[in-house]
Image (cartoon, helix red, strand yellow):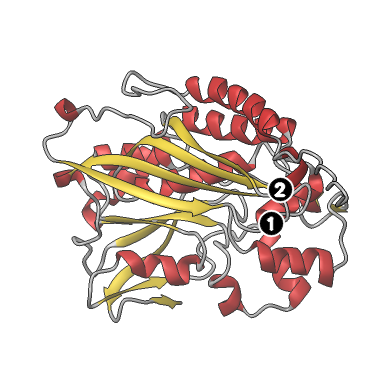
Amino acid sequence: MPEAKKKAASVSYADAGVDISSGDRAKQRIKYLAQRTFSKNVLSEIGGFGGLFKLDTAKYKQPILVSSADGVGTKLKLAFELGIHHTVGADLVNHCVNDIGVQGATPLFFLDYLATGRLDGEVTEKIVSGLADACRANSCALIGGETAQMPGFYQDGEYDLAGFIVGVVDRDKLITGAGIKPGDVLIGLPSTGLHTNGYSLARKLFFEIAGYKPELYINALKDKAGAALMKTHRSYLSVIQKLTAGELVEGMAHITGGGITENLPRILPKGLAAVVDIGSWPVLPIFEHLRELGNVEQEEMLRTFNMGIGLIAVVKPEKFKRVTGLLDRASEKFHVIGRIVKGDRKVIYG
């Protein structure tokens, strides 16, 4: 008689590295955190196939939806090493809020995408808590997202984080830069640090070239190396809303990857350029330190980092005093960093 085949052992999804039960527990906590951001316009619960949001059309004559998607980038590598996971959610939300805010949009709702090799409930809660806190601070509802377990794709202890935001603005309040003219003034608002850009170079300079450890205190920065790099990407929404409510700006640029060099031209009409005066604002010590560590050319610094300016507003000369008065009352620091001239949609450093 033929030998009987041995019965194969039962194999589960968990054996392949995906623990559905653990994921379900994490999602219950995510549901609680997200619900704290809900407004009356959210019509769905976390866990549905799609998030539902009711647009209040009574508030807008001609509503224009403005959307943006982004990620945190290699700043996450530092988060893994330091075990700091609650700030990267705020980095992501604030970045997306600023991107639509410079076009005059008010945030409505946010979706996140979190992918990891093996789901760690404690880490996931810290990340989502940061997302939820930032959404609440920006009056934006966290209405859904995706938490994916992808064993073999991500190393243990690593994850990726991305987000998608939708906001709204009335058509006649949309800020496009179309009204920018020669002679308009450039006002820069300070950043808190690198925000979420330039981390591949910054990490190389700090940890490979200089050989720093994240916990090393650097006198030039008056901070530890890791803490200096992990400073949260700030939201400019509050000051943006004050400026737009008074119809005081012609255009605004969020200074992200590409620095002032590549972001400011995005709002310039054809036939115009921007003169930016080097030395018109205090460059944060971390950027000077990075430059010195790698003997990095100034041009490279300016097209990689924000250099201490996170947002630029373009203002008519006749509105300049009103704008600066508003910023003073809001206790918002600012710097007059340049002007608009005739040219070929580029930044000219003076």
Residue closest to the eye, 14 or 223: 14
Toward which corner of the image does residue 148 lie, by quadrant? top right
* Residue ID for mark 1: 153
Can you give x and y, in whole percent of width and height, for residue 42 in the image? 35, 24
Q: Which mark is residue 272?
A: none
> Is the Cβ of the residue at disc 2 closer than 8 Å to that at disc 1?
yes
- Judged from the image, the secondary structure of the residue bearing numbered disc 2 is loop
- Horizontal side of 269 relative to 155 (left or right) equals left
Please report the residue visible at 62 percent of the width from the left and 23 percent of the height from the top. Answer: 29
Please report the residue visible at 73 percent of the width from the left and 50 percent of the height from the top. Answer: 158
- Horizontal side of 260 relative to 124 (left or right) equals left
The answer, for residue 186, to whether it is visible in the render is yes
Please report the residue visible at 32 percent of the width from the left and 45 percent of the height from the top. Answer: 323
* Residue ID for mark 2: 117
Q: Tag 1: residue type?
A: Phe
Toward which corner of the image does residue 122 lie, by quadrant? top right
Toward which corner of the image does residue 194 lie, by quadrant? bottom right
Give the Cα distance between marks 2 and 1: 6 Å
Q: Residue furthest left?
A: 61
Please report the residue visible at 22 percent of the width from the left and 48 percent of the height from the top. Answer: 174
Residue closest to the eye, 29 or 19: 19
- Judged from the image, the secondary structure of the residue bearing numbered disc 1 is loop
Can you give x and y, in whole percent of width and height, for residue 304 in the image? 57, 69
Q: Residue furthest front?
A: 1
Can you give x and y, in whole percent of width and height, for residue 62 in the image? 13, 40
Badge 1: residue crowd in 10 Å (few <14, some 14–19, many ≥20): few
Which comes sooner in the sequence, label 2 or label 1? 2
Badge 2: residue crowd in 10 Å (few <14, some 14–19, many ≥20): many
Q: Tag 2: residue type?
A: Gly
